[in-house]
Image (tube, helix red, strand yellow):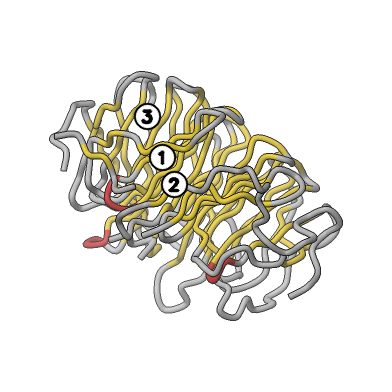
Amino acid sequence: MMLKAYKGCSLVLLVLGLGACSADSDQPSTAEADAGLAADGGAVEADDAPPPIRIDSNAGLTAVWGSSKDDVWAVGGEGLILHYDGKTVSPMLSPTTRSLHAIAGTGPDDIWMAGEEGTTLHWDGTSFTQVSRNEDEMLLGISANAPDDVWVVGLVPVDRAGLVRHWDGERWTEQEVPGCQSLWEVWSSGPNDIWFVGTGASPTLGGLIYRGDGHDFTRLEFSGKALRGVWGSSGDDVWLLPYDSAPQHWDGSGFMGDDTPMGDNGMLGTWGSASDDVWAVGLNGTIMHFDGEQWTQLPKVTDKTLWAVWGSAKDDVWIAGGEGTLLRWNGKRWRQFATGSVAAAVAP
């Protein structure tokens, strides 16, 4: 892969062999709601709903993804992995105690997880394999187009550089991206349209965007704030999520948005099911929703930091957050599936 550097950055390409590594904190250290969205303002559960499972550690959940509404995964600090099977949420036996910050896959038997110290796990439907680890890396985002087309982004703290990794089904290729503090998220509308977003280099620390076809990437002109999330319904309908200002929209020809500050509601993750159903979450339990015309901040259901959002449909949305918080929206109300400060089950 080749990234065309904006302002003349040089890049280094490395090839990593696939191999199992020994296993062994958490860096990702009020208007009324839309009609029908949490109109009662709370995480209302049916009276006969079972209580949420309780996390015995202080590990937070920093990423959530599923292959369907009955196969949902959440990962977080201390190697914590939770799985929802359509009925209950249960902790899984994890092969690592390192914090996990990202998860994505192509199906129930092809799921990737990544995080602290370059830890990369793969679930084949039966068991986990730790495929790689590099103490110099922090991995923060994953996008999987196919079993042989997986993208991971993050940073190399000691080099003050972003990091892009790609799995082609046989090996990982890896490339550092100087000129940026970090790459926080990766999203793709398809195998030939990949987006990386993050934080540019000092002194401005503004938003950074690379877009490419899987082989060549170009840094796009963007003058907004540092970016923490990206999601789109297509390559011409993409939302960029700055940490401390209003979401920015790409319409195929340029970026539109304003610099409305988010105050203490810093934004951390975004996802959508369609162009008129986009979600964003952040600090202090902030949940925002876009209905195709405007963004609305919804009534809070928790004060915990909310790191990530994912769903299988408009009426099936999951949010992962601090202290083991795992929420689900069913189209009418929220239900809390996990809370607390069960410990990560770690393989001996």
For the point 50% across and 66% down, the residue is 304
Question: Where is residue 230 drawn, in percent x and y?
Answer: 59, 51
For the point 56% across and 71% down, the residue is 225
Three-letter amino acid code at disc 2?
A: Ile
Of 212 and 261, nearer the camera is 261
Residue named by callout 3: 167
- Marks 2/1 in contact by CB < 8 Å: the verdict is yes
Q: Is residue 35 visible?
A: yes
Three-letter amino acid code at disc 1?
A: Leu
The label nearer to you, 2 versus 1, is 2
For the point 55% across and 64% down, the residue is 282
| Residue 186: image tag | none
Question: Where is residue 249 drawn, in percent x and y?
Answer: 71, 57
Q: For mark 1, give the secondary structure.
A: strand
Between discs 3 and 2, the one toward the N terminus: 2
Between discs 2 and 1, the one toward the N terminus: 2
Q: Quadrant of the C terminus?
A: top left
Question: Where is residue 105 drawn, in percent x and y?
Answer: 47, 30
Three-letter amino acid code at disc 3?
A: Trp
Q: Is residue 214 visible?
A: no
Distance Cα–Cα, label 3 vs label 1: 24 Å
Residue named by callout 2: 53
The label nearer to you, 3 versus 1, is 1
Of 86 and 52, nearer the camera is 52
Q: For mark 2, give the secondary structure.
A: strand
Left or right: 48 as drawn, with respect to 164: right
Q: Is residue 38 above or below residue 236?
A: below
Mark 2 Cα-neighbour bin, 10 Å: few <14, some 14–19, many ≥20: some
Q: For mark 3, give the secondary structure.
A: strand
Residue named by callout 1: 82
Q: Is residue 89 above or below residue 288?
A: above
